[in-house]
Amino acid sequence: MKYREKILEIISNNNFHNSQDALSEWLETIPLLEQTDILREIEGMLKEIADEKGINLEGIINLEDFNSLVDEIEEAVLEEKLYEAKLSMAEDDEEIERIEREHFRVVVRKYLMDRIINEEEDADDLLEVVKEIIVVEKESGRFDPENWSRILHIIDSPS
């Protein structure tokens, strides 16, 4: 609610395309974590306006996809903040290296899963790479199915 006035100001002072640009420019000045709150506020306002005007948003905009995207953005921002906090609390170079390696593994896993789920051009090749990574993780005792939960249903038999 605290962003509602600013959003309404931007929308009322611009036409549709200028509003999008103005909202984007304003969003860039806001801390990342707060941007998700603003996006949720915009979503709520869209629903309200649609209800007031009797507009069925279904087919025009998929709010579930929008919500999922906002959740993903928020999760990524929180993961980055956690990574930064862990680094700042690290007591020695060895711990910093361990934190950086784990962060790198998380980023690579997310990249691989995103490419596979989105069926990018290299998805089949990356799926084979993931299968090999999982085999190595299992052999070394580091396999955690939760890490790969978004794509485990796609993998035939990763053993």
Image: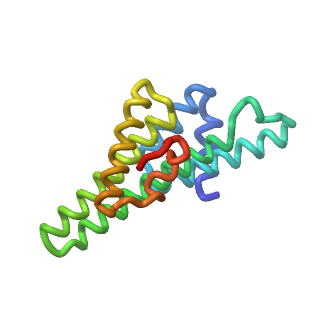
Where is 99 relative to 130, above or below?
below
Give the side of residue 106 with respect to residue 24, left or right.
left
Residue occupying the point 35% across, 57% down: 138
Q: Nearer the viewer, residue 70 or 100?
A: 100
Q: Position of residue 24 (x, y in %)?
A: 49, 37
Residue lying furthest right: 54
Q: Nearer the viewer, residue 4 or 125?
A: 125
Q: Position of residue 12 (x, y in %)?
A: 65, 36
Q: State the image quarter where residue 83 is shown.
A: bottom left
Residue lying furthest bottom: 91
Quadrant of the image containing the N terminus: bottom right
Residue occupying the point 44% across, 51% down: 30
Instruction: Count numbered badges in the picture.
Output: 0
Residue lying furthest left: 93
Q: State the image quarter where residue 78 is shown.
A: bottom left
Q: Position of residue 49 (x, y in %)?
A: 77, 41
Give the side of residue 151 with respect to residue 103, left or right.
right
